[in-house]
Image (cartoon, rainbow, N blue to C red):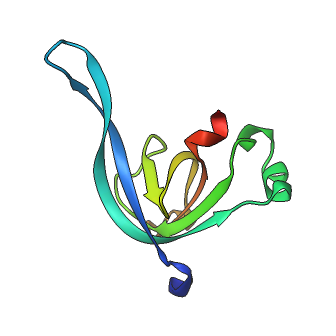
Amino acid sequence: MNPGKLRHRLTFSIPTYTQLQSGEETLTFVQLGTVWGSIEDLSGREVIQAGQQLADVSTRIRCRFLAGVTPECRIEGRRRTFDIVHLNNVDNVNKEYEILCRTPEDNV
């Protein structure tokens, strides 16, 4: 990982359900942690090469490892919010993530 390319602050949040006084459950996000990373918008060609299973992927994020991150987490960075589509712990050594994401607006 080239630390010079990690120029974006990324905040990871975990989804939790909170019960309101009315008994209704509401989805909220609790901050897990913040790390430095890079955000790359993917070209149309990269998205096609990723395959049909990941057809809604629009962004690749590379960042330092943060314990507790799951595909259900949400990422905020560069004034955008990202949903994780695929989470890759590079070389399984808990040092770096490569994350394929989409923004919620991609599904509209």
Q: Foreground: 12 or 50?
A: 12
Quadrant for the N terminus in the image: bottom right
Give x and y (percent) for residue 71. Answer: 49, 44
Above/below status of 30 relative to 20:
below
Q: In the rendered view, does 78 fall on the left or right side of 59?
A: left
* Residue positioned 60% across, 41% down in the render: 105
Q: Is residue 31 left or right of residue 19?
A: right
Residue 54 vertical placement versus 47 (above, below): above
- Residue at the location (57% across, 62% down)? 61
Residue 6 percent across, percent down from the top left: 51, 78
The residue at 19%/12% (across/down) is: 23
Q: Is residue 1 above or below residue 76?
A: below
**Residue 11 screen position, x and y as percent:** 38, 59
Answer left or right for 38 relative to 42. left
Q: Residue furthest top?
A: 23
Question: In the image as oriented, which residue stretches furthest toward the bottom?
Answer: 4
Image check: 46 left or right of 103? Answer: right
Q: Count of labels shown?
A: 0
Looking at this view, is 49 or 29 the one in front?
29
Q: Position of residue 8 (x, y in %)?
A: 48, 72
Give the farthest residue toward the left. Answer: 21
Question: In what quadrant of the picture does the C terminus appear?
Answer: top right
Q: Nearer the viewer, residue 74 or 22?
A: 22
